[in-house]
Image (cartoon, helix red, strand yellow):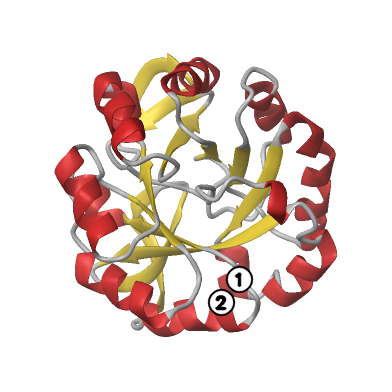
Amino acid sequence: MNVIPAIDLLDGRCVRLYQGDYARSQVYSENPVEVAKQWVDQGASRLHLVDLDGAKAGHPVNTKTIEAIVQAVSVPVEVGGGLRDKEGVSQLLSVGVQYAILGTAAVEDHPLVEHLCSEFPDRIIVGIDARNGQVATRGWLETSEITATQLAQQMANLGVSAIIYTDIHRDGTLTGPNRDALRELASHVSIPVIASGGVSSITDLLSLLALEPLGVIGAIVGRALYTGDVSLKEAIQAVGQGRLQDIPPDLGSSSLA
């Protein structure tokens, strides 16, 4: 089980949202680069970045900050938020981002997803963010008619490498991951699934180990790291990274795209 710290960017700062509500954001640092270096120093083998401004704008916004983070750390960085065309994906990959996470595009533009998977093999994953089982898009500001499981199956057929599943009602709440929803989604696809949203303790992370046989092979941790409820070093030690060699290189956490 891979533990992946999340860094959410809003106006160039490191923040956390409560249930995806932009009006309920809390600033944790004015210097996201230092935050990124801190997580790597504590053992993170991958960083998950979300461009919250980009998610609303529909194109990357915090590119300079993202590039600075990429240059400052020695681990792969993945980014979601506003990646809805080839230009946006290419822009981030060109500044050193290893993996691009698609969200809204996965719902609205299947030909684009298929093309990007072909153009950038093993560098495209899809973030599925759900509210009451229905997929949310455009920075969680809109809710589609498709269910998370249906979209996951469609994306698997298009050739994406993995699914990052975020339960919006759990995100930023420290109420624990939605294991039932994760079990439902993972049981319907053959590609790996990453859990995101609600992790409040190392116990929550350990509880996800039971879903590994279904393909849930990683977890994104955000607010709990910033509040101190979870120590990254202790979490990595507790869940272990024994299967890391079996995890495709394009995996990571919560995306607002």
Q: Is residue 59 above or below residue 234?
A: above
The residue under label 1 is: 44
Q: Is residue 179 above or below residue 251?
A: above
Percent from the top left, x then y, of residue 196? Answer: 58, 47
Res 185 quadrant in image: top right
Secondary structure state at the residue bearing disc 2: helix
The residue under label 2 is: 39
- Which quarter shows the C terminus? top left
Percent from the top left, x then y, of residue 207? Answer: 82, 46
Question: What's the residue at 19%, 37% (across, down)?
Answer: 85
- Give 40 or 174, whichever is nearer the viewer: 40
Task: Classify residue 228 as left or right of residue 105.
Answer: right
Task: Classify residue 15 as left or right of residue 203.
Answer: left
**Distance Cα–Cα, label 2 vs label 1:** 6 Å
Percent from the top left, x then y, of residue 194? Answer: 60, 43
Q: Is residue 163 above or below residue 2?
A: above
Within 10 Å of the Cα at label 1, are there few (<14), some (14-19), or many (20+) other Cα atoms? many
Percent from the top left, x then y, of residue 150? Answer: 50, 15
